Structures are given as C-alpha cells and as structure tokens.
Image (cartoon, grey):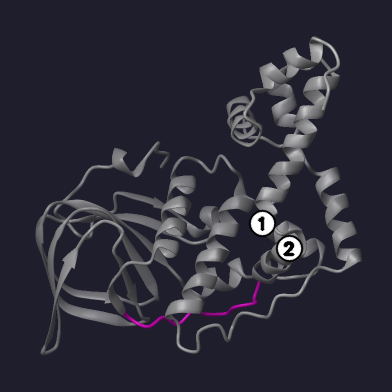
Amino acid sequence: MRLSSLHDLPTSDDPRQILAHVPASIAGLPLTVLPIPARARLTADYHPTPRIFVAQQGYGRRWYRCGSTTWDMYTAPRMIEVYERGLCFDEEIWEGEPGRCVLVKFSDHDVETLTHGDVRSVELSTRHEIFDDGICRLVFELAHEAFIGMPNGAVYVQGLCVSLLDALLDRYAPGAGAKIPAARTLGAAQQRRLANLFREHLGTPLTLTRMAAEVGLSPQHFGRLFKATFGTTPHDHLQSLRIDAAVKALRRDASLSIVAIALACGFASQSHMTETIRRRLRVTPSALRRGSAAGPRGP
C-alpha cells in the first residue's frame, strides 16, 4: 500500500483492523499501522512475538488487565509500548480521541534473516508509556520510507531496521548490549572490494545484504564496521558516490537527458535525483548543467 503520509489513513474503533501493512520481505521487518480507538474493548489479546507500538496520533486513557493486575495508562503521540514474547492481556479498554500507531514485530525468522544470523532472536522486557526519541524517529522514518515505496532504496530501509534492532537490544533487552559485537574497522582488502562493488553496480539497487556478503559479514555487523571505517552509513556513502557521478555526467555530456543520468547513477527517478542533489548541494541538476554550458568557473 503506497501512501504520501500516515495521515492519509483513516482511524477506526476496531483495534484489530489493519489500516496498512508492509511485509518483512519488503521492509526487512514487518510494519503494520493499527488504529488507536476512541472507545473500544478487546479481550484475550495475545502477542506471540516481541514487538513495539509507537503512537503516531491520538490522546486518551487505556486500561489493560492481566489477571488481578490492571494498568491505568495514557496515550499520546510518540508514546511507545514494548512487549515481551508471549505477553497476553485479558482485557483492554480505550477511551479518548482516535489515532493510529505503528507496530513492528520481531519474529525469530525475520531477525535472523535481517542480521544474516548474527542475531537469532530478540527478547524484550515489557515497558509501558515510554518516550524515546531515538526509537520513535527510527520507526517513523522506516514507516514513511516503506509506505511511500522506498524512494531511497532497500539499503536505506535495511539500515534503519538494523539501527532499530540495535537500539532495542541496547536499551530494552535483558543483558543489553551483550549481543552487539564491538566495533572495529573494515580491512584494506574489504574496502577495495566495496569500492569495486560500488563502481561496477552504482546504477543498480544495492542492498545492505549484498554489500555485507561482498566482505563476508552479517548486515548488522557490516553496518557498524562501515560507519566506524568511513564515518557515515552505507546509504549516505552510496548516495554521495551517486551524487558525484551524476554531477560529473551533467557537466560532461549534454546529450544525455537528466532522467537518463538519474537512472544510470542509481536514483529511483529524476525527481529523486533532483531532491537529493538540491538537499546536499543546494543546487538543481538543471542549474548544474546550465553552469557547465556557461563555461569554466573557479572552485
């Protein structure tokens, strides 16, 4: 389902209604948008896998009951719920203004696939009414990218998933940080292999998994070593290489259309290249081409 914003989605008083969904096969981790009802009651709510809920919109109160214990809680935008594996609430009641939340599940299969076996499962400790700006930004950016069709490419979305997984392991898992290998740097031979990969496949969709496989690492470990080596993420590094190639092509060959250059350099479209170059260089591709046609300029 392709959206321009989560605000495009309706609200609902059925807490089990799925408003939008992107499977793990596309986004790396499954993403589901669910309603926060204005008034509703739900019984026997079982959560077999670890998961988090991040509220995007909606205010109100919630009462969750498990056995003889009842939690009296509030709902607000950017509030996070972290649920452990196998958690079950006997009854849930909502009362307030309608809204939406983003659900991210962490099944063993999806986690192992995403990390290439580096992490086989995630165990989270249940936490209610959390405000964690880092987690919130990652989830909303991941949801935005996934639901608008991943204009920045699979490597960017996979990087967000790995960053989210690392942050949760670091903050909300028993033995936090124990599963994350200490960062060092990529070796010279690994850097050469990556440089060749980027040069030969700049115009094709490169995934984090493909990059990691080139140097014999899991995607999770690769992302940390790459940043320790180059000081930036694989996605940002790849975008810089694509921008550099596009600028050279715009100045060198006036016979190529801007859209052809965009696709040859690995951008999803001409508008994607235009926005990326404008954001990084504060200039448009057309202006770069006109500047080149006007003759040499100083540095």
* Quadrant housing residue 194: bottom right
Using the numbered discs, state the Cα–Cα distance from disc 1 to disc 2 in whole angstroms. 7 Å
Amino acid type assigned to the residue bearing label 2 in the image: Phe
Q: Examine the structure image and report whether residue 206 is included in the region drawn in magenta.
A: no
Q: Is residue 108 above or below residue 55?
A: below
- The residue tagged 1 is 233
Residue at horizontal 62%, vertical 27%? Answer: 274
For disc 2, the marked residue is 226
Q: Going by the image, does 219 lie left or right of 123? A: right
Residue 31 in view in this figure: yes
Q: Is residue 117 above or below residue 263?
A: below
Relative to the observer, which residue lies in front, 21 or 39? 39
Residue 207, percent across and down? 68, 53
Q: Earlier in the sequence, mark 1 or mark 2?
A: 2
* Spot occupied by residue 103 in the image (x, y as percentages of width and height): 35, 61
Q: Quadrant of the N terminus?
A: top left
Asked if the residue at tag 2 contacts the one at tag 1, i.e. Cβ–Cβ closer than 8 Å, the answer is yes
Residue displayed at 68% across by 17% down? 287
What's the magenta region?
A: 116-126
Q: Residue at x 81, y 25 (%)?
A: 249
Callout 1 secondary element:
loop
One can see residue 255 in this view: no
